[in-house]
Amino acid sequence: MATKIRLQRGGRKSYAFYSVVIADSRAPRDGRFIEKIGTYNPNTNPATVDLNFERALYWVECGAQPTDTARTILKNEGVYLMKHLKGGVKKGAFDEAAVQQKFDAWKTEKKNSLDAIRNTDAEAKKEARAKNLAAEKATNEAIAKRIAEKKAAAEAPAEAPAEEA
């Protein structure tokens, strides 16, 4: 049986949410599956992935073929890196401790880059909010100034005839 690692669509209209599943290659996209190994939410920035790493690694080592998007998700989560490092252990290039050390170093670097993306996004949103608030205050001041000028213009002609009489 040829197995695939694919995404199964869920969520509502215009708000996709996917499950990462192991399915028979003949099964339809949202049809029957063998095992659910995680979720993928592309609506957040950066996209949120919750993956059972051990099961994903097991299925990749068993020969399950991922779709293009599933392969990208697995690469970003480090499944393919771990498969590559375990291949080095089988060949005798290094031991399990070195594999874990290399993987942990990669994982912390990846986490730091994602945190940097989140921080820059949060700062950009904060700056945009501040800019919008300043623009709104300027607009409100301009409106208040025009209203004050209209009131002054309306009161000035009313006072002028009273003084002449």
Image (cartoon, rainbow, N blue to C red):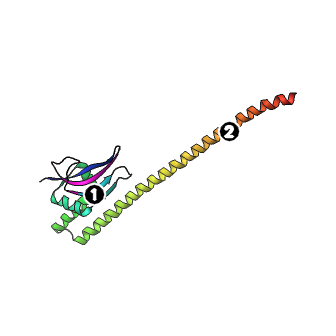
Mark number, residue 87: none
Q: Nearer the viewer, residue 47 or 102?
A: 47
- Stretch of the chain drawn in magenta: 13-35
Mark number, residue 145: 2
Q: Nearer the viewer, residue 29 or 106?
A: 29
* 102 relative position to 161: left or right: left
Judged from the image, the secondary structure of the residue bearing numbered disc 2 is helix
Q: Quadrant of the N terminus?
A: bottom left
Residue 13 rendering spot, x and y as whole percentages = 34, 43
Q: Quadrant of residue 151?
A: top right
* 64 relative position to 108: left or right: left
Give the amino acid at mark 2.
Lys
Judged from the image, the secondary structure of the residue bearing numbered disc 1 is strand
Mark closer to the chain start, 2 or 1: 1
For label 1, the residue is: 38
Residue 159 rendering spot, x and y as whole percentages = 81, 32
Give the amino acid at mark 1.
Gly
* Residue 65 forms part of the magenta stretch: no
Question: Residue, x 25% and y 50% (percent of image)?
Answer: 7
Nearer the viewer's eye, disc 2 or disc 1?
1
